[in-house]
Amino acid sequence: MNAVHFFGLAVVASAVTAMAVASPQNPGSLEKGGEHAAHFLACARACAECSLQCDSCHHHCEQIVIKGSKEHVKSMDLCVDCGEACRFAATLTARHSRLSVLACECCARCCDECATACEAFKDDRHMSECAKACRDCAKSCRDMVKLVKA
């Protein structure tokens, strides 16, 4: 297991742990019942999974760039930034932070950009998996935001 994947697993574990201790008594909690808790957890998990995919795809693109193919520079840069946005959103969402809506709105937009860049390489399975994770994460973030704003 490389350091990126270990760190990614630590983020997932942290997000799930924070979700487990979030409660209505938590002053930062936006929880309005079981439905909200389920959406927050689903969003935190989608964001954490996307961060792992983005980190892995960043490494994949980096290796291609190192070999001289500059066409992956944009996706490489977007993957690393998107992964950071996803980790941030996963952490805040898992603990029902009052800032989770802002983090998820940002995350969804970052995921849109990253997915578009990765989808440009249709024959690359690694890039396709990253794009799918980004699309799933963006949808989950937008669903959670709609629920909270309702």
Image (spheres, rainbow, N blue to C red):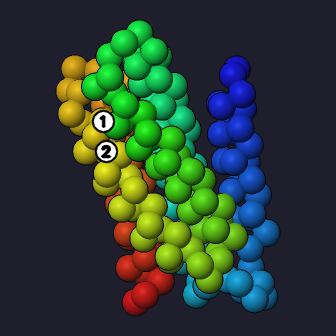
Give the residue pinned by disc 2: 115
Which image quadrant is residue 75 in? Answer: top left
Q: Please tell me whether residue 72 is drawn above or below residue 23 in the rendered image.
A: above
Which label is found at residue 118?
A: 1
- Residue 139: image x %, image y %? 35, 60
Q: Amino acid at mark 1?
A: Cys
- Residue furthest toward the top? 67
In the picture, measured across the screen, residue 93 lies left or right of residue 72, that is right
Q: Report, in whole angstroms, how far the alpha carbon at label 1 lies from the one at label 2.
A: 5 Å
- Residue 48: image x %, image y %? 57, 49
**Residue at image location 47% in from the left, 23% down from the top:** 62
Q: Nearer the viewer, residue 92 or 31?
A: 92
**Residue at image location 44% in from the left, 66% down from the top:** 106
SS assignment at label 2: helix
Which image quadrant is residue 127 in? Answer: top left
The residue carrying pointer 2 sits among few (fewer than 14), some (14 to 19) or many (20 or more) residues within 10 Å by Cα, namely many
The reply to whether dot 1 and dot 2 touch (C-beta < 8 Å) is yes
Q: Please tell me whether residue 127 is drawn above or below residue 36 in the rendered image.
A: above
Q: Amino acid at mark 2?
A: Ala
- Residue 21: image x %, image y %? 79, 69
**Residue at image location 40% in from the left, 19% down from the top:** 65
Q: Nearer the viewer, residue 135 or 19?
A: 135
